Amino acid sequence: MQQRQLGSTGPMVSAIGLGAMSFGGIFGPTTEADSHACLDAMLEAGITLIDTANIYGMGVSETVIGNWLARRKPQVTLATKASIVSGPPRCIDNSAAYLRAELEASLRRLGRDHVELFYIHRRDPGTPLAEVIGTMQDLEREGKIGGYGLSEIAPATLRAAHALHPCRAVQNEYSLWTRQPELGLIQACKALGVTFVAFSPLARGMLGDRPLRLDEVQDGFRSSNPRFTEPNFSANIAAIDGFRAFAAQRGWSTPALALAWLLQRWDHLIPIPGTRSAAHLRHWAQADAIRLDAADLAEIDRLLPPGFAAGDRYGDHQLMAIERYC
């Protein structure tokens, strides 16, 4: 697996990371044994970056990872997040007291005394940015975190935060069907030496080898997401069919091609596809070995041009504290 640096002063990690949201059951039921098998396959593939959060299954994802770390004792880089309070009511809390308490709880679940990266999962506009970044600086000085990150932010927020104290990574959704970060955020990260971490790079399962069925996306998140409800769902399936056929023609899996496209476009980007399945992970784990030529890139752009997706990436009910900048 190729390596990329996590921020200008952070550790070298695998060019592809693993998103662990589904370990918490968010995209369907799973077991700790299945998640551990997925983590084992991750190690075999040379993936060394694991991304989780306190809210993924309300601590379940971190607990599963912590139990695996205790058993395998691997050399991996960990990222976790806090800020979203599940409620009711659901809200965002960037206060020092909350972030400290949640980080300590995460560390207990992970069995670690520190994590290499700690994200503000969402920004609370009611808390001064200088106060939030000051909390991150304090946690760095105390050795609790190696660096801080920001999630679902606008370029202006990144520049303001980075001027206060260098940011290690920004995590926003980015894939062939979600291209908004190309309108300034990815470029801002590049200019500042900040790693861009792309979550949902496989379009929440839509960029898989097999087309999803509507009955398969009736989980809590996707069932009310505009891109997974009709008539958008069928339109998106039809649009992606050509890309899937192109990948098969070239001898690549669909998810591996989608990840290779991301990796080749930006050298400061790390995608973190999520899965709870070892088999699914193996379908895309060698994406960094794919080399796309100009003809490949042109064909991908023809098949899935910017803005092809039907429906917004979030519904209005899912937009709390998402910074929108264009």
Image (tube, grey):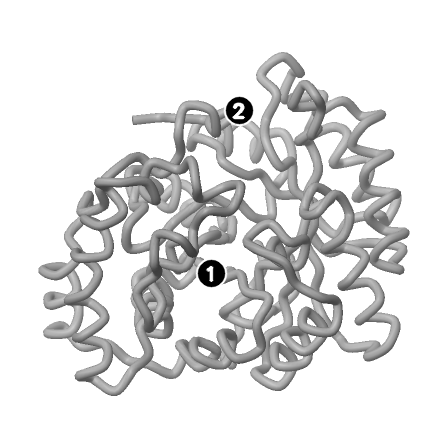
Residue visible at 61% across and 69% down in the picture: 12
Displayed quadrant of residue 202 = bottom left
Q: Residue 244: x, y in percent?
A: 23, 71
In the rendered structure, which amino acid carries the disc numbered 2?
Ala
Asked which secondary structure carries label 2, the reply is: loop
Badge 2 crowding class, 10 Å Cα cut-off, few under 14, some 14 to 19, many 20 or more, is some
Residue 31 relative to residue 271: left or right: right
Label whose residue precedes the other's in the sequence (1 or 2): 1
Displayed quadrant of residue 31 = bottom right
Q: Nearer the viewer, residue 121 or 36?
A: 36
In the rendered structure, which amino acid carries the disc numbered 1?
Pro
Q: Residue 146: x, y in percent?
A: 74, 52
Q: Which residue position holds label 2?
A: 321
Q: Which mark identifies residue 271? A: 1
Q: Residue 69: x, y in percent?
A: 81, 70
Q: Residue 90: x, y in percent?
A: 65, 23
Residue 191 relative to residue 101: left or right: left
Q: Please say if 77 is above or below 1.
A: above
Residue 323 relative to residue 230: left or right: right
Q: Quadrant of the C terminus?
A: top left
Badge 1 crowding class, 10 Å Cα cut-off, few under 14, some 14 to 19, many 20 or more, is many
**Residue most toward the top?**
126
Residue visible at 41% across and 57% down in the picture: 201
Residue visible at 33% across and 78% down in the picture: 253
Asked which secondary structure carries label 1, the reply is: strand
